[in-house]
Image: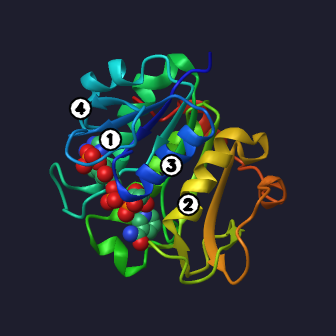
Amino acid sequence: MQSPIAVIGGAGRTGVLITRRLLEEGHQVRVISRDPHRGVLPSGVETHRADVRYADVLEPALRGVGGIVFAVEPGTADSGPQSPETTVYDGVRNVLAAADGNGPHFVLISQIFVTRREHPMNAYGRLLDWRLRGEDEVRASGLPYTVVRPSWLTDDEVAGARVRLEQQDRGNGWVSRRSVAEACVQALRLPTASGTTFEIYNEPGQAPTDWGPVFERLIPDRVPAYLRASSLTGA
Ligand SMILES: NC(=O)c1ccc[n+]([C@@H]2O[C@H](COP(=O)([O-])OP(=O)(O)OC[C@H]3O[C@@H](n4cnc5c(N)ncnc54)[C@H](OP(=O)(O)O)[C@@H]3O)[C@@H](O)[C@H]2O)c1
């Protein structure tokens, strides 16, 4: 029997779409949420109450999983529990530390602009800096991983349903939560997405039916030696 996939933030707007698609694909899904009974989750999911800011609760929640999707909203405070440092940097480190022994594929939802420090979004708790550092932790972890950087999220396919991936973080645009969710699910499935970081946009056209060609052109990350050497987690 396949190991379950943990979706952290699996009760959120993108998270619940990921959860549904994983169930459709026949996976066991473990939704990790600070309050799993607050919203309506699809039937058949296992739930775990856990908060990425508290390392001790993550280890039992992640025990035995074969994949992890991290779909956590970062907050915008400069410091304290609602700051990006705490949620998408410490939070990622905590999850990596809790998951390490299992070797699961880690899919991190990040965002566009993370390499553009001058962008106004960085004024909110240094959101972009901490997101990038969280990404670096994942790239340095030694786990199989995919970093998905959505552009501005929409509930409808306002920009179209076709998917365009980029890898330079120079663009701007829109992407539906549905496309992001599908990218996460397919990244867990297709080896060509492993070891890559990409931005995701929608454009006019049809949604992909086969993600093989979508991922095929991705260039695998070159993780700098200084990141690989220290495996930043715990440094
Ligand atoms: N909005 C945009 O335009 C945009 C653009 C690019 C990227 N993104 C990113 O894409 C991802 C999905 O976005 P979304 O709008 O679909 O998310 P969302 O509906 O806001 O859901 C995010 C989830 O994060 C979880 N969460 C927050 N703090 C947590 C913590 N400390 N521990 C565990 N879980 C925590 C919440 O789960 P519980 O409340 O159940 O614990 C929530 O369901 C997020 O990372 C977001 O920042 C957004």
Between discs 3 and 1, the one toward the N terminus: 3
Q: Nearer the viewer, mark 2 or mark 4?
A: 2
Q: Position of residue 152 (x, y in %)?
A: 47, 75
Tell me the amino acid under the disc marked 1: Asp
Q: Position of residue 9 (x, y in %)?
A: 36, 46
Local secondary structure at mark 4? loop
Q: Nearer the viewer, mark 1 or mark 2?
A: 2
Mark 2 and mark 4 in contact? Answer it, CB < 8 Å. no
Q: CA distance from mark 2 to mark 4?
A: 27 Å
- In the image, what residue occupies the spot 62% across and 20% down? 2
Tell me the amino acid under the disc marked 2: Val
Q: CA distance from mark 3 to mark 2?
A: 8 Å
Q: Which mark is residue 54?
A: 4
Mark 4 and mark 1 in contact? Answer it, CB < 8 Å. no
Q: Nearer the viewer, residue 27 or 65?
A: 27
Q: Nearer the viewer, residue 26 or 222?
A: 26
Give the quadrant of residue 66: top right
Label 1 CB-ligand 1 distance < 8 A: no
Local secondary structure at mark 1? helix
How packed mark 4 is, by other alpha carbons closer than 10 Å (few <14, some 14-19, many 20 or more), is some
Label 3 CB-ligand 1 distance < 8 A: no
How packed mark 3 is, by other alpha carbons closer than 10 Å (few <14, some 14-19, many 20 or more), is many
Question: On the image, numbered disc 1 is attached to which residue?
Answer: 90
Give the quadrant of residue 24: top right
Between discs 1 and 2, the one toward the N terminus: 1
Question: On the image, numbered disc 3 is attached to which residue?
Answer: 18
- In the image, what residue occupies the spot 42% across and 50% down? 16
Tell me the amino acid under the disc marked 4: Tyr
Q: Nearer the viewer, mark 3 or mark 2?
A: 3
Tell me the amino acid under the disc marked 3: Ile
Local secondary structure at mark 3? helix
